[in-house]
């Protein structure tokens, strides 16, 4: 067996946000199967520094700081008939580095994480190509277009079309396309017409030792937590679906909750809140934290964790982490999709029209909150450990493994 080349659109470390959690655990698992070389982009200087932590895992490491701005990528994409999402990562220097790795090392498998990285995988029948799309990114832009007007609507619709065509072409030449859930795999097959055997599922897991109610981490001080019921929403807050969800919950749902629970507070916990979201901080009952050293302190302090997303793709790590921490979770139908849990026993699901009432009722019932949290933790222990989720990966990359790929049905 030869080596594996792992391509990633972002340095897969530290595992402190959704995409990095998945890419890091995939990389670490593959490194236990074969010698792995890593080529990835860095968002900034901090990301470049983080890459050094991965050297013990990999053979050769190439990291390139991404400098192409979104406006430049948009101009290039519009001129060249490409998806902006793909043009954002266009780099001849990166492509040359990948070509050198393939030429110089005994690589027989290329594993690309996130669709944009497929542009650096040259057609080669001698090498296995596994594409981890994670979710159907083009469908997200379709959803954006539905909510937009004017030029924005046109741009989003164009991106959905162009990216969808790119995804279809990539999947047609990949040996296997991976998705985070059976729902995403099924959606992709419906949109592309590709056979079921071309798609497989690798679900996300949870670091059960790190995300545990009994783990060692810094708890919130009483003055930081405050008094009264605490509702928490976590995520990367410059990501549009997260920002929109936080805004809607704070402005449309929290007032109804506070009508029944006047001391209830809503903490928006996550890095890079922008504009209107930052201005919510200090509004009655609302706290916008920005980046925090450890999200577990806020999860542990929460009476309820909410995931009120109207647009969501794949499996929401934020939901699994809250469940692993033994919290009572109220998720929107979009945030719940792809999570194998019993509604009413292990978490609650509520749409925008009913979420305020469901949360307010749950604040009235501490016994039920504890029961939901206990059942949630038990679920992730038996269902979502990373080792179990990644067990089929060796066979998917062509290595000996008695467990066959989890082909999506």
Image (tube, rainbow, N blue to C red):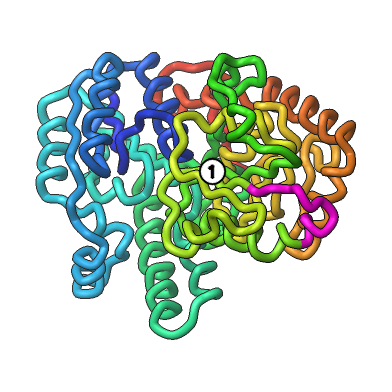
Name the quadrant of the N terminus. top left
Question: Is any atom of residue 1 visible in this view?
Answer: no
In this rendering, is residue 338 above or below 157?
above
Residue extending farthest front: 223
Residue 9 x, y percent position in the rendering? 31, 43
Residue 78: image quadrant is: bottom left
Task: Tell me the element at label 1.
Answer: strand
Q: Is residue 265 left or right of residue 290?
A: right
* Residue beneath the point at 38% across and 75% down: 155
Residue 327 x, y percent position in the rendering? 72, 32
Residue extending farthest bottom: 150
Q: Is residue 279 left or right of residue 5?
A: right
Residue extent of the magenta highlight: 256-266
Residue 262 in the magenta stretch? The answer is yes
Name the quadrant of the C terminus. top right
In this rendering, is residue 108 above or below 358?
above
Q: Is residue 341 left or right of residue 16?
A: right
Residue wearing tag 1: 269
Residue 388 x, y percent position in the rendering? 59, 21
> Looking at this view, is 270 or 228 the one in front?
228
Residue 274 x, y percent position in the rendering? 42, 58
Tally of numbered discs? 1
Give the crowd class for mark 1: few <14, some 14-19, many >=20 residues within 10 Å: many
* Residue beneath the point at 52% across and 62% down: 191
Question: Is any atom of residue 358 visible in this view?
Answer: yes
In this rendering, is residue 377 above or below 34?
below
């Amino acid at each position: 067996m030869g080596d594996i080349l792992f391509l990633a659109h972002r340095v897969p470390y530290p595992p402190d946000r959704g995409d990095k959690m998945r890419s890091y655990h995939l990389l670490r698992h593959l490194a236990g199967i074969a010698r792995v070389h890593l080529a990835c982009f860095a968002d900034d200087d901090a990301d470049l520094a983080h890459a050094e932590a991965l050297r013990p895992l990999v053979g050769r490491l190439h990291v390139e700081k991404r400098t192409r701005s979104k406006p430049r990528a948009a101009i290039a994409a519009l001129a060249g008939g490409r998806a902006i999402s793909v043009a954002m990562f266009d780099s001849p220097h990166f492509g040359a580095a990948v070509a050198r790795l393939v030429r110089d090392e005994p690589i027989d498998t290329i594993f690309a994480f996130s669709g944009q990285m497929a542009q650096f995988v040259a057609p080669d029948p001698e090498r296995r190509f596994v594409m981890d799309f994670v979710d159907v990114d083009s469908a997200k832009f379709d959803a954006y277009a539905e909510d937009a007007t004017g030029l924005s609507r046109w741009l989003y619709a164009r991106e959905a079309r162009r990216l969808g065509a790119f995804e279809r072409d990539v999947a047609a030449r990949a040996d296997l396309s991976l998705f985070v859930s059976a729902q995403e795999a099924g959606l992709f097959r419906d949109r592309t017409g590709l056979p079921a055997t071309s798609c497989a599922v690798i679900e996300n897991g949870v670091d059960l030792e790190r995300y545990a109610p009994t783990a060692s981490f810094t708890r919130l001080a009483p003055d930081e937590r405050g008094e009264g019921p605490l509702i928490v929403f976590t995520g990367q807050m410059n990501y549009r679906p997260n920002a929109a969800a936080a805004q809607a919950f704070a402005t449309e749902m929290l007032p109804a909750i506070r009508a029944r629970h006047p001391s209830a507070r809503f903490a928006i916990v996550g890095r890079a809140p922008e504009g209107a979201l930052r201005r919510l901080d200090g509004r009655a009952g609302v706290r916008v934290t920005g980046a925090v050293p450890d999200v577990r302190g806020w999860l542990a302090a929460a009476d309820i964790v909410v995931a009120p997303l109207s647009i969501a793709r794949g499996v929401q790590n934020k939901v699994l982490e809250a469940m692993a921490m033994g919290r009572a979770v109220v998720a929107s139908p979009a945030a719940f999709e792809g999570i194998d849990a019993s509604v009413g026993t292990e978490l609650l699901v509520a749409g925008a029209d009913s979420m305020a009432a469901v949360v307010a009722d749950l604040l009235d019932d501490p016994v039920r909150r504890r029961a939901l949290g206990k059942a949630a933790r038990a679920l992730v222990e038996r269902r979502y450990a990373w080792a179990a989720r990644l067990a089929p990966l060796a066979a998917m990359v062509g290595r000996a493994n008695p467990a066959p790929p989890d082909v999506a049905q």
